[in-house]
Amino acid sequence: MNELAADLEALAAFGAEGAGVSRLAWSPALLDASRWLLERARAIGLQAELDAAGNVIAKSPGSGPAIVVGSHIDTVPQGGRYDGALGVLCGLAALRRLAADGFSGSRPVWLVAFMDEEGARFGTPMFGSRAFVGEDLRELGTRRDEQGVALAEAMAAAGFPLAEVSRARAVDQVECYLELHIEQGPVLEARGVDVGIVSHISGSIDVRVGLVGQAGHAGTTPMDARHDALVGAARLIALIRDEAAAANVRATVGTIAISPGASNVVPGAAELSVDVRASEEATLDRFAGRLAELTAAVGKQEGLETSVSETARLAPLTLSSDLQQLLSGSAQEVGASSIAMPSGAAHDAMIVGRHVPAAMLFVPSRAGVSHRDDEYTSNEQCALGCEVLTRAVSELAGGA
Ligand code: GLV
Ligand code: MN
Ligand code: MN
């Protein structure tokens, strides 16, 4: 087994759940994994710390603005072992190569594992990269997880006061950003191509829809006198699916909370999360408008109070054409076939790439599967992508 494969296996042990991994933001599993990564980075001579946002930052020596390579090591619940983790560990492998050459390049290279890319626990995706670029995140502290724990409380318990998160801003010291990631879709495998060079990344909005009716006795409330919030939710979920298909949008209701939540009580309230993705921001805006209309219509039909609020937005991003060219040259040099392709998934590169030139490299995902415990990319595919990334990092660092 090569060192990258061994690292992947070691990292997958943190938060292991069956075949998959659960490392949610600020959880002990994620923090233990972060400390493991710090040790791996220190072992090759990097200066490695957790910053005020819980990002792992490991720096090679050198002067001038930094070349940053990274991704994230948090996961969705019962996620796979490659999403995010592979990009971080390939970054580590690239730095290992520079270390073997005595960091002979003149530029500093930073490996970064961003905190909470997934946003799965508090609905706060890209928390770490947003802090890294200096966004003000203090208002997110009151977001609560399913257990009712607030983000600010979870951070404080881990030793990271939210009030100090602005200290994580470091983008002003950065020259550019590179991120390797699994494709999370079927294109590379279907076309038999080694790597994808990402041209642009779709935008997304996260919307919370609230439906409030009236709880009541399941045995005595007449069927025609109900204001059942879950029936409204069911109607709405099907309408969202149909509307998204017609509008060339990806829309997903991924969570639903019902109250009071008992088998013998008519549901009085429901809250749904709606994740919407599209490559154009205008399309997202149009869909958000339609979602508000559909929700109001269902509310009227079922006699429910409704509310719709946007909780997160990531605008689409076009990646740096110079860095895309660099990656494509690196692919050629190491003998990897490549194509340009868009990303339907969101990535930290969307945040960092608004401030400095950024690029992304995809490796194939078996059957396009991701956000599942059977995510898989072979060791050979990982190693080849890693080689392309390493080549590009070396060139940027001046050591190639
Ligand atoms: C990140 O995994 C996303 O939600 O696209
Ligand atoms: Mn993900
Ligand atoms: Mn990811």
Image (cartoon, helix red, strand yellow):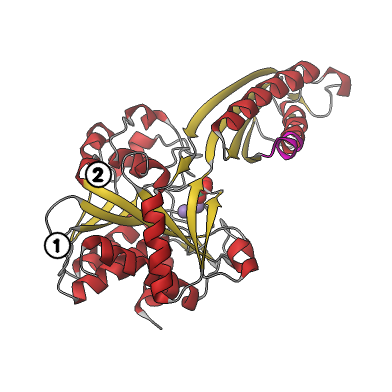
Tell me the SS state at disc 2: loop
Tell me the SS state at disc 1: loop
**Residue 5 on the magenta span:** no
Q: In screen coordinates, is 34 left or right of 120?
A: left
Foreground pick, 349 / 242: 349
Where the N terminus falls, by quadrant? bottom left
Q: Position of residue 203 (x, y in %)?
A: 52, 39
Q: In screen coordinates, is 148 left or right of 254?
A: left
Q: Which of marks 1 and 2 is nearer the N terminus?
A: 1
Say the numbered circle drawn on residue 164: none
Query: Mark 2 = which residue?
Result: 159
Foreground pick, 116 / 260: 116
Q: Can residue 231 be seen in this view?
A: yes
Where the C terminus falls, by quadrant? bottom left
Q: Does label 1 point to a residue whose CB lies under 8 Å from ligand 3?
A: no
Q: Height in image: 110 above or below 269?
A: below
Q: In which quarter of the image is residue 192?
A: bottom right
Q: Position of residue 115 (x, y in %)?
A: 35, 48
Q: Can residue 8 be seen in this view?
A: no
Q: What residue type is labelled 2?
A: Gly
Q: Where is residue 112 in the image (x, y as percent from the top left)?
A: 30, 54
**Residue 246 on the magenta span:** yes
Q: In screen coordinates, is 226 left or right of 371?
A: right
Q: Which amino acid does label 1 sit on?
A: Ser
- Category of crowding for the residue at label 1, using alpha-carbon neighbours closer than 10 angstroms: few (below 14), some (14–19), many (at least 20): some
Q: Most prominent secondary structure in the magenta stretch?
A: helix
Say the numbered circle drawn on residue 106: 1
Which residue in the rendered view is the most extreme toward the bottom?
1
Q: Determine the residue positioned at 35% across, 78% down.
A: 3
Magenta region: 242-248
Q: Determine the residue positioned at 38% across, 68% down.
A: 330
Q: In which quarter of the image is residue 266?
A: top right
